[in-house]
Amino acid sequence: MICYFDASALVKRYIQENHSERVIELLNTSRPATSRLSEVEVASAIVRRTGGGDIEPLDRDRILAALPVDLETLYILEISPEVCARTYGLLLRDRLRASDSLQLASCLHLQERVGRRVRFVAYDDRLNEAALTEGLEVEG
């Protein structure tokens, strides 16, 4: 099974919260994929949580050092012209934020390229609703 991980799911790999165990299980038992955008989104979430006092600076530094190494174990979809073009329809139909539209477009692009179902893993209700509307199988 191929699972596409949105940044809202990947951050659970580094911060213990609801669904963290499920995300780690899926990362270990599926063929994981994500967008290049996730690297920046996860780093941003980690830095914001440090500023909010949820993460200690030493833990932040450890996580930020591990992130690029961990991402090497995932199939990374680059932000290509094809993926960007697909975001326009999603923006119009689903009224998503640009980053969410790009994540969803990346998953749809991957599913089209591999010719089989890809499970979309995200923990954002609005994004999951849009993914269901687009015909994706959703975990989250």
Image (spheres, rainbow, N blue to C red):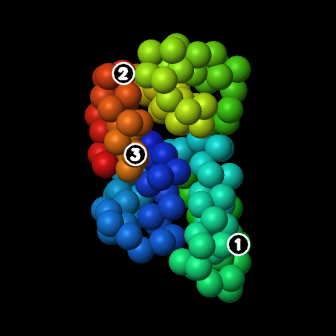
Residue 35, picture quadrant:
top right
Spatial separation of the CA atoms under disc 3 and disc 2? 15 Å
Q: Report the residue marked by disc 3.
A: 124
Question: From what the image shows, is residue 3 above or below residue 81?
Answer: below
Q: Amino acid at mark 3?
A: Asp
Left or right, 110 with reference to 35? left
* Residue at position x 32%, y 66% in the image: 18
Amino acid type assigned to the residue bearing label 2 in the image: Glu
Q: Count neighbours of disc 2 (C-alpha within 10 A) and say few if under 14, some if 14 to 19, many if 20 or more.
A: some
Q: In the image, which is nearer the foreground, mark 3 or mark 1?
A: 3
Sequence-first tag of 3 and 1: 1
CA distance for labels 1 and 2: 35 Å
Residue 60, image x, y percentages? 65, 76
Discs 1/2, front: 2
Q: Residue at x 63, y 65 (%)?
A: 48
In x, y percent, where is residue 28? 39, 62
The answer to which of marks 1 and 2 sits earlier in the sequence is 1
Residue sitting at x 65%, y 61%: 43
- Along the line of sight, the residue nearer the viewer: 107 or 32: 107
Q: Is residue 69 visible?
A: no
Q: Please state the horizontal and vertical placement of residue 80, each as a whole percent of the image.
A: 69, 26
Q: Hey, which quadrant is residue 117 in on the image?
A: top left
Most extreme residue toward the front is 52
**55 sits left or right of 133 in the view:** right
Query: How dense is the environment of label 1, judged by Cα within 10 Å: few (below 14), some, or many (20 and up)?
Result: few
Q: Nearer the viewer, residue 13 or 96?
A: 96
Kindly identify which residue carries mark 1: 65
Asked if labels 1 and 3 touch by Cβ distance under 8 angstroms, the answer is no
- Nearer-N-terminus badge (3/2): 3
- Please rate how many residues cluster around mark 3, counting C-alpha atoms within 10 Å: few if below 14, some from 14 to 19, many from 20: some
Question: Mark 2 = which residue?
Answer: 134
